[in-house]
Amino acid sequence: MNSPQRKLSPDQAHRLTLEAEPWLSCDDCFDQIDFFAERVVSGGFIGMPALRAHLIGCSACGEEARSLVQLLAADDGVDPAPSLRRLSDG
Amino acid sequence: MTILDGPELADAHPVSREAISREAISREAISREWPGSGHRTGAHTGAHAAPATSAGPSAPANDEWISLLSSPGPGHAEALAGLHQLLLRAARHQVSVMSAQTAGIGEVRRQELIGQAADEAMVAVLGKLASFEGRSRFTTWAYKFGILHAAVEVRRSLWRNREVALELLPEPAAVGHSPEQLAEAADFSEAVSNAIAVELTAHQRQVVMALVVDEVPIDVLADRLGTNRNALYKTLHDARGRLRRHLQDTGYLDETAKGVIP
Ligand SMILES: [Zn+2]
């Protein structure tokens, strides 16, 4: 029943063992991502640890969150780099 | 503050194939009722100005958007057109941030993807207007639908003719660390590989290997397995938990570690 073991890179092994807690589903992430992104771009208090953990554990939601933050920064006419750093700093 | 549960959002989420087919049907209906959309008919010159299509100081209030979009009347068509412009902007932005992946797609297909994603997002947004609680600007709330639909469209398009071959894995490239760190990382990688073999179910193994190792996009894998993004992420999350417990029991992970950084 077991398939042959496959060689993993250190990065793959790391991503396979991420904790990503507290738990949040993709649907709940989608529900909250708009006001989360506004908090990130505003530079104020962010909070929302479950959402942040989800964005680290789920690459699709993470990619879309980074994109939304970039778009908001563009609308505000500000450099997206600090917001993206806040997003990835955890 | 109300946190919506998963099923309530299923209609808005493009990973639901049922939702997509419903959207495809109603998209046509919406386009017929959509005289102000620059996307379809060029600039509109009606008496009522559409709400601004980006969130600047002059952007309309959230309740103005909801009121104009919710019921036919003065300004309704222009609000629909304004919303579609927002969604086109979000979809175009998403496709552009994925440009490294879409280099081989071609400009015509890229524009098709943008239009298709904006149309699908339009149906999703209009279907979820009642759930908008004003916790963000309306424009931000709308953007997330455009981004989501565009991202899913791009991922599906890139994988349309690709097999999800679970047994084909390229040899990982060595990372630039000291010989000791390399040996330690290889040791840990091997322990993770063993844990996958002994701790995970066949389904968990298939999902984690496809998502994390082969980097199959989650929406594409959901299509192939007849499931959705939510369910696959839950499988990945549970599998990670099992792997972590096994690695803690065998001394490869500290119980307080968030994950080993090689
Ligand atoms: Zn997710």
Image (cartoon, coloured by chain):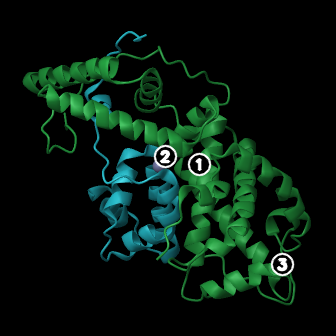
B89 over B224 or under it: above or below: below
Q: Is residue A35 visible?
A: yes
* Vertical order, B35 against B17 (above or below): below
Do the residues indicated by labels 2 and 3 lie within the same chain of the protein?
no
Q: Amino acid at mark 3?
A: Ala
Asked if the beta carbon under badge 1 is closer than 8 A to the nearest atom of ligand 1, the reply is no
Q: Nearer the viewer, mark 1 or mark 2?
A: 2
Q: Is residue A38 left or right of residue B123?
A: left
Direction from residue B141 to residue B81 in the image, left or right: right
Q: Colour of chain A?
A: cyan
Give the secondary structure at mark 3: helix
Residue A35: image location, x then y, percent? 46, 72
Residue to which mark 1 is pinned: B151
Q: What residue type is disc 1 on?
A: Ala
Instruction: Tell me which chain the residue with mark 1 is part of.
Output: B
Tag 2 secondary structure: helix
Q: Residue B172: x and y, percent?
A: 33, 21
Mark 2 residue's CB less than 8 Å from ligand 1: yes
Residue at 12%, 38% in the rendered image: B254
- Same chain, marks 3 and 1? yes
The quadrant holding residue B49 is bottom right
> What colour denotes chain B?
green
| Residue type of the residue flagged with mark 2 | Ala
Q: Are marks 1 and 2 in contact (CB under 8 Å)?
A: yes
Mark 3 residue CB less than 8 A from any atom of ligand 1: no
Looking at the image, which is closer to me, A37 or A48? Answer: A48
SS at mark 1? helix
Which circle marks residue A60 in the picture?
2
The image's mark for residue B77 is: 3
Task: Determine crowd level at label 3: few under 14, some 14-19, many 20+ residues with C-alpha closer than 10 A.
Answer: many
At 73% across and 63% down in the image, what residue appears?
A: B122
